[in-house]
Amino acid sequence: MAKTVSVSTFRFLPFTLLLLPGLFRLSAAIYTPIREYSGNEFFSEWDYYGDIDNTTWGNVDYVDQSTGASQRLTYIDPNTNHAIIRVDNTTNITAAATVNRNSVKITTKDAYPIGSLVIIDTWHIPYGCSVWPSFWMLGTNLLWPNSGEIDIIEAINNLDSNQYALHTTSGCFLGTNSIQSGSILQTNCSTGAGCVVQEKKPNSFGSGFAQAGGGVFATQLDVSGIYMWFWPRGSLPASISQANSSSPMNLADWGTPTAAYLSNACNITEYFQPQQLIIDITLCGVWAGVPSIYNSTGCSGQCIDNVIGTGNPIYNNAYWDIAYIRTYLATATTTVTTGNTSVSPASLTSASPASASTSSSSGANDANANAATAASTLVHSLSWSSWLCALVLLGILRFC
Ligand SMILES: *[C@@H]1O[C@H](CO)[C@@H](O)[C@H](O)[C@H]1NC(C)=O
Ligand SMILES: *[C@@H]1O[C@H](CO)[C@@H](O)[C@H](O)[C@H]1NC(C)=O
Ligand SMILES: *[C@@H]1O[C@H](CO)[C@@H](O)[C@H](O)[C@H]1NC(C)=O
Ligand SMILES: *[C@@H]1O[C@H](CO)[C@@H](O)[C@H](O)[C@H]1NC(C)=O
Ligand SMILES: *[C@@H]1O[C@H](CO)[C@@H](O)[C@H](O)[C@H]1NC(C)=O
Ligand SMILES: *[C@@H]1O[C@H](CO)[C@@H](O)[C@H](O)[C@H]1NC(C)=O
Ligand SMILES: *[C@@H]1O[C@H](CO)[C@@H](O)[C@H](O)[C@H]1NC(C)=O
Ligand SMILES: *[C@@H]1O[C@H](CO)[C@@H](O)[C@H](O)[C@H]1NC(C)=O
């Protein structure tokens, strides 16, 4: 079972305000770093799936940790210190009833509650015909999709734009009035595709992404909504380009998100439980391999024909190159200005509950907590959100 992270200094939620009635959004949250997945320690905090792809039914065998290491499907590049996660591109697979090629699916040992921020800096995302990579988050407490799924990086074949999506049970939607820069493809989060937003910035996926030096994707999981950003390598905000693993993160220079799933159309606390991070690469399967989709995403012939044979050169680009993944939890916030009114959430701290510190005494650098602390964190989230939501009734804030 996943541990849910918490932080002893957790006080209140990121102060993301939505002005009534325009839904104009200002981010001024400060986040405390919880963990960096990077370098030689990258793979130590993940579990390897070690089974077939029994969720998206691709033609892969997801290897265990020792096979991943011995076949160099997961390793640290000694030159860059980046984590490499890739599909086998040497084994000669013969046509047969079951045609599976070795690949990787890994899941973090930690689960991140509402109030978390996740930043991934990657130089290469797997691409090519039949290739279906994903960096995503999944609530694992209940049967899918009862505790929610957040797809942060996902596309297929020769598509050149990333797609973001949520998957939930019935009743969660992407509101059409969100302030976001991406294109809405689907608004109903309980459909098979989920509620999907497509990136409009260039070079968010495929060969273009790799040639531009990759970039950074960020996801904010907040009671007010779930927000996702992308910046290509050449235009990272200073808050990210100048940060190291121990820097607090301030979202003030992040700009408009690509995707903004606001809580006015999807009650985040109702549909999302603590989320584990997952990185995988499948081949073909129920999206990339559907003949009509395969054919309309820049590929000809049959998907399975890529898997058969040595996989060379088609899978030479089927790899992730990840500089780091950093995770954060909301802590103190700066003064937020909404319209002509300044609000200082610091005035709220005197009433801040502090019981999280009793079960996680070693602080943010050792913030893995047991389920009890996880529950406590969530209780904090809910109590603060309820409290702040009460202000909505007074017409002061829009916070839920
Ligand atoms: C996939 O297989 C794993 C391991 O056998 C199992 O725990 C899991 O429940 C399966 N998932 C689905 C969706 O069938
Ligand atoms: C792969 O195996 C097939 C049949 O098993 C064989 O015809 C083919 O020559 C092999 N390819 C390589 C590169 O060895
Ligand atoms: C959303 O999708 C679900 C699943 O397909 C469906 O049951 C529901 O009626 C849809 N809701 C709306 C408002 O279209
Ligand atoms: C991160 O940057 C801060 C501020 O520049 C510096 O004080 C700190 O030592 C750095 N930490 C690491 C781990 O590099
Ligand atoms: C959102 O869901 C939470 C948890 O189920 C619930 O307590 C809260 O009342 C809901 N908020 C709204 C506005 O429906
Ligand atoms: C997709 O299928 C159509 C009809 O069979 C064909 O003309 C077209 O060339 C195919 N597209 C690709 C990219 O192979
Ligand atoms: C397999 O792909 C990697 C890049 O992921 C490349 O470095 C290597 O040369 C490829 N192997 C072969 C046999 O081409
Ligand atoms: C802010 O103040 C300006 C000038 O006093 C006024 O025109 C504007 O309507 C105000 N905006 C809001 C949101 O109150």
Image: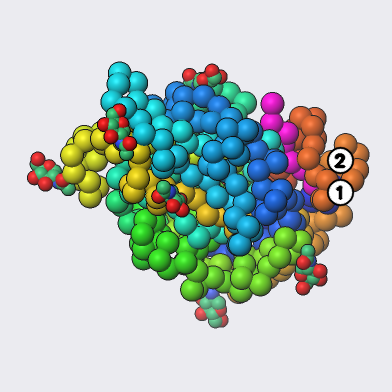
Determine whether, in the image, residue 131 is placed left or right of residue 254. Answer: left
Query: Which residue shows up at 34% across the image and 26% down it?
Result: 99
Q: Is residue 24 magenta?
A: no
Q: Cβ(mark 2) to ligand 4 < 8 Å? A: no
| Label 2 secondary element | loop
Task: Identify the residue position indicated by label 1 in the image.
Answer: 363
Asked whether mark 1 lies closer than 8 Å to ligand 4, one says no
Q: Which residues are magenta?
A: 1-7
| Residue beneath disc 2 | 360
- Disc assigned to residue 89: none
- Residue 166, percent from left and from top: 46, 41
Q: How many marks?
A: 2
* Residue under the point 41% across and 42% down: 89
Category of crowding for the residue at label 2, using alpha-carbon neighbours closer than 10 angstroms: few (below 14), some (14–19), many (at least 20): many
- Can residue 11 be seen here? The reply is yes
The residue located at (39%, 56%) in the rendering is 205
Label 1 SS: loop
Residue type marked 1: Gly
